[in-house]
Image (cartoon, helix red, strand yellow):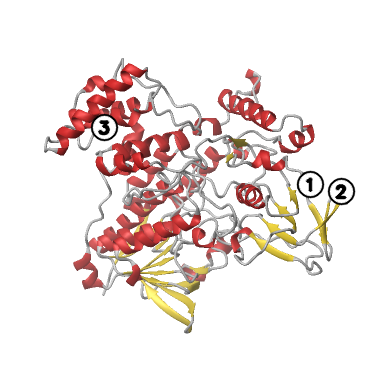
């Protein structure tokens, strides 16, 4: 119903559908809410009117409002969600829903005159989005991928139970929709989607796999990057005018070196380096970690293993989601294909529910303690509801409740979805240990308290080295300064998360402090790619040799960013996660709501940069 109301208004221009008695109610949690909370007679009215409008459109009646914007779009978004949506969402929604899509300027002829070229490091979602828009702009480019196939994280995600934790109708490019078989797709389907993107946009001639970028050095005389690569042909150096890194946040696995690891005779696997030949049937297994990948692995293999111990350093807040395992219906796909704007409004509803709905709960009320609250009224409400859900799922198992109930506030770490986790913990062949690993023996694992478990296979769900951006690449900018040395290894900073002083013509995708506070990374990725491609087309059009962010806007941005991050729940004392580096600074997360970051990257301002013209 909410989506059909959006369709009805756009097709007919009749504003009565945006008001009482057709006002839908807000969605609670992640429920389907297909009827929008409307009584049956109103549902029937909306369906009948939508049917008539769609049939008239199909016979040639023009669309009344094909590209809503401004106040009109505000009213329309609010009606579709059943709650107020402010004007700050207009630019983001207009672009993401296809009402005002990003179209890069075509600078093909100018590139031919100047020899301007780009290298993109990584063929995951961010790198391929850059490739799509670089090709549309007519800028020559190469995409270099270290794996033998494209896909980045999703090519490497082969562990049992792996699936995306954002609905795929949102976790996909706005400019390349797909009819997904499930709400939360598994890696094979995501990999097929990526292959289809490459085929549809003709990107294959630009992509080189099994090519590792070891580093790059800025050549000031030539105003170019000399990029050192390694492939089956050995090492060589290639050159480009601009360098885009799209290596991603979840790039280099974090593999702990427990005492006794060399003595352990069993198999050791990291979730990001899974061996498909692994046979878990009848085996005694230890899983280290209790985050997103651990939850997926544990639930997927519990039927096969003889015994499994889950070694949990700290529990995560977990929410129910009835959509997690559901398949998408043929009816939804038919609507996508045949009803204009329906898919757009379905995507917007997912965006709102999975992104904007939670954001206010991440902000700490500075007067919370005075009001008798821990974080804020909203965050505390989440805590009560999630606690009640956990207790209901683990009723009668006080031992598991004590181990599974987090002590930190919700959203201190990423909120996880219950994929059967609590039910799996109750199984007789599964044990949960709420402590660390002291050491390994030849045939087992010993916890901090001295408890010993026989182990045939050790599975490490220990995440990635997210704080060490671009590790192990070595990038040297002006005067030979190495990028990660300037970042003190784990203290990366960038302007807009995209570029840094001293490194001309170098742009990061999924760079420092750009992990969104919720929802789909691809929404942010598209904003970053637009910013970078607009910068590159500006360079070509204005015949610029270099662009380099100035120290003043760089420092001002990062001061504001740190101040804002420090007011978020994940920066509170006692909350530990991969978001923070060795000094406690938040280095991965953006504190901005997604439309606020979108606005910052929508206004390309060359006054923030030192620019130099081409001289040849």
Q: Nearer the viewer, residue 472 or 126?
A: 126
| Image quadrant in which you'd find residue 573 | top right
Is residue 236 placed above or below 146 in the rendered structure? below
Is residue 214 placed above or below 185 in the rendered structure? below
What residue sits right under mark 1 in the picture?
435
Frontmost of labels 2 and 3 is 3
What residue sits right under mark 3 in the picture?
7
Q: Earlier in the sequence, mark 3 or mark 1?
A: 3
The C terminus sits in image quarter: bottom left
Secondary element at image label 1: loop
Residue 611 in the image: x percent, y percent?
33, 60
The answer to whether residue 219 is left or right of residue 469 is left
Residue 160, visible in the rendered structure: yes
- Residue sticking out furthest to the right: 450
Q: Tell me what residue is drawn at x 24 percent, y 28 percent.
A: 50
What's the distance in space between the residues labelled 2 and 3, CA to CA? Answer: 60 Å
């Amino acid at each position: 119903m909410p989506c059909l109301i959006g369709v009805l208004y756009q097709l007919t221009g009749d504003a009565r559908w945006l008001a009482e008695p057709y006002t839908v109610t807000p969605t609670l949690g992640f429920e389907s809410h297909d009827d929008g909370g409307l009584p049956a007679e109103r549902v029937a009215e909306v369906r009948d009117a939508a049917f008539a409008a769609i049939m008239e459109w199909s016979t040639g009646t023009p669309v009344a409002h094909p590209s809503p914007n401004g106040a009109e779009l505000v009213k329309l978004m609010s009606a579709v969600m059943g709650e107020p949506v402010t004007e700050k969402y207009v630019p983001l929604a207009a672009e993401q829903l296809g009402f005002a899509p990003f179209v890069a300027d075509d600078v093909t002829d100018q590139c031919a005159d100047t020899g301007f070229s780009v290298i993109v490091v990584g063929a995951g979602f961010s790198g391929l989005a850059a490739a799509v828009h670089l090709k549309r702009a007519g800028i020559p480019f190469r995409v270099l991928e270290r794996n033998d196939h494209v896909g980045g994280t999703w090519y490497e995600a082969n562990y049992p139970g792996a699936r995306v934790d954002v609905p795929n109708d949102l976790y996909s490019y706005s400019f390349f929709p797909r009819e997904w078989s499930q709400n939360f797709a598994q890696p094979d389907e995501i990999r097929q989607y990526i292959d289809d993107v490459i085929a549809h946009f003709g990107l294959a001639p630009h992509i080189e796999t099994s090519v590792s970028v070891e580093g790059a050095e800025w050549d000031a005389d030539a105003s170019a990057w000399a990029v050192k690569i390694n492939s089956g042909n050995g090492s060589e150096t290639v050159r480009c005018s601009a360098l885009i890194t799209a290596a991603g946040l979840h790039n280099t696995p974090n593999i702990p070196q427990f005492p006794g690891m060399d003595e352990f005779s069993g198999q050791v696997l990291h979730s990001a380096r899974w061996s498909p030949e692994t046979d878990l049937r009848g085996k005694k297994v230890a899983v280290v970690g209790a985050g997103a990948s651990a939850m997926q692995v544990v639930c997927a293999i519990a039927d096969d293993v003889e015994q499994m111990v889950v070694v949990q350093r700290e529990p995560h807040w977990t929410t129910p989601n009835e959509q997690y395992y559901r398949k998408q219906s043929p009816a939804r796909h038919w609507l996508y294909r045949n009803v204009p704007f329906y898919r757009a409004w379905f995507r917007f509803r997912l965006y709102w529910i999975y992104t904007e709905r939670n954001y206010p709960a991440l902000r700490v009320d500075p007067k919370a303690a005075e009001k008798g609250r821990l974080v804020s009224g909203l965050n505390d409400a989440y805590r009560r509801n999630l606690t009640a859900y956990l207790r209901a799922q683990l009723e009668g198992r006080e031992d598991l409740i004590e181990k599974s109930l987090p002590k930190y506030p919700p959203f201190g770490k990423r909120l996880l979805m219950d994929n059967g986790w609590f039910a799996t913990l109750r199984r007789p062949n599964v044990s949960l240990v709420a402590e660390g690993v002291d050491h390994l023996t030849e045939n087992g694992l010993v916890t901090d308290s001295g408890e010993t478990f026989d182990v045939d296979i050790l599975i490490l769900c220990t995440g990635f080295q997210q704080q060490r951006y671009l590790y192990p690449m070595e990038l040297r900018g002006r005067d030979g300064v190495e990028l990660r040395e300037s970042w003190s290894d784990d203290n990366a900073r960038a302007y807009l998360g995209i570029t840094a002083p001293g490194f001309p013509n170098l742009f990061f995708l999924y760079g420092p402090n750009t992990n969104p506070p919720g929802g789909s990374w691809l929404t942010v990725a598209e904003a970053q790619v637009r910013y970078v491609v607009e910068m590159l087309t500006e360079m070509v059009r204005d015949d610029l040799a270099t662009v380099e962010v100035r120290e003043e806007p760089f420092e001002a941005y990062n001061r504001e960013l740190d101040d804002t991050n420090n007011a978020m729940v994940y920066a509170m004392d006692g909350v530990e996660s991969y978001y923070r580096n060795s000094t406690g600074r938040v280095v991965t997360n953006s504190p901005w709501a997604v439309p606020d970051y979108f606005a910052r990257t929508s206004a390309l301002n060359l006054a923030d940069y030192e620019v130099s013209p081409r001289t040849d």
